[in-house]
Amino acid sequence: MNFLTKIITADNTETFLNTKVKESYHSQTGAVEEALKKYALPCKIKELAKTGKIKILDICFGLGYNSAMAIDVALAENHHCEIEVVGLEYDPTIIEKIQEVSPPIHFFQHYKKLTLSSLSFQEGKIIVNVILGDARETIKQLPDHYFDAVFFDPFSPKTSPQMWQVPFFEQAFRTMKNTAILATYSCARMVRDNMSTAGLLYDNGPLVGRRGPGTIATKWKNEDKINP
Ligand SMILES: C[S@@+](CC[C@H](N)C(=O)[O-])C[C@H]1O[C@@H](n2cnc3c(N)ncnc32)[C@H](O)[C@@H]1O
């Protein structure tokens, strides 16, 4: 049975509704808007692009909008920027659906190369690699202190509570550079408490679409940051 139904969100961009978990893959107030305003902007992708190299961990990759949008933002700032994206996703069905959407994200045309038989590609200085499997396990194979930006986009804490627990945030912390920023759409108390227990410092992320602000998390307070 097909449990994925295409829907059009309020910014006129497509996503899917997952009827098994009764949640959509993006905010219904705007799928592409969310990728830009909840992930690329708070993770300071534009600023990172100036350094010439960005490593992005796209947790719960889905259709890949968040990292594809970040690539657009980075390349608009610095056309020569080297970008590595690692995506973690456990559902092959949603990867197949990449072929059925055409969001207004320029780099997304290359994401169409992602198929179940080919989960990575290189396009110029951009490398994208999707690791299929439960992110709670696959994250363990990623190196320490590696990523500049972490996009954390599971289904809600109610639907996927296992993704929002301390052990997962500890793993995310481990993979983050000291200067890295993690962004997520949730501002739930439980989520923030678990981030704190894992050693992350959190703050309000942008208020876009959904009821509350998102959350951004770092390893250090801004004023404690050592130069990158
Ligand atoms: C809200 S959607 C993410 C949307 C995605 N960021 C995009 O731009 O299309 C949540 C995603 O988390 C994935 N997911 C849920 N549990 C997971 C797990 N344990 N490991 C990896 N992915 C998981 C789902 O399959 C789904 O694609």
Image (cartoon, helix red, strand yellow):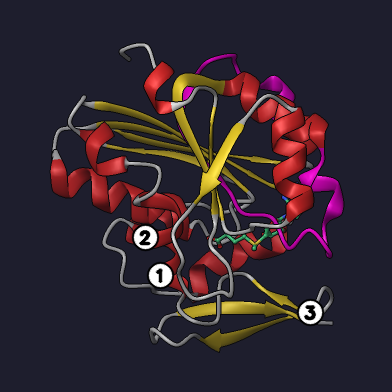
- Magenta stretch: includes residue 144: yes
Label drawn at residue 36: 2
Residue at left offset 56%, top offset 74%: 210
Mark 1 or mark 3: whose residue is earlier in sequence: 3
Pick out the residue farthest to the front. 223
Instruction: Give above or below for 1 relative to 87.
Output: below
SS at badge 3: loop
Residues shaded magenta: 139-165
Label drawn at residue 22: 3
Amino acid type at image mark 2 = Leu
Amino acid type at image mark 1 = Val
Q: Residue tagged by mark 1?
A: 32
The quadrant in which residue 121 appears is top left
Amino acid type at image mark 3 = Lys
User: Ligand 1 within 8 A of label 1's CB?
Assistant: no
Residue at left offset 81%, top offset 30%: 167
The quadrant in which residue 176 appears is top right
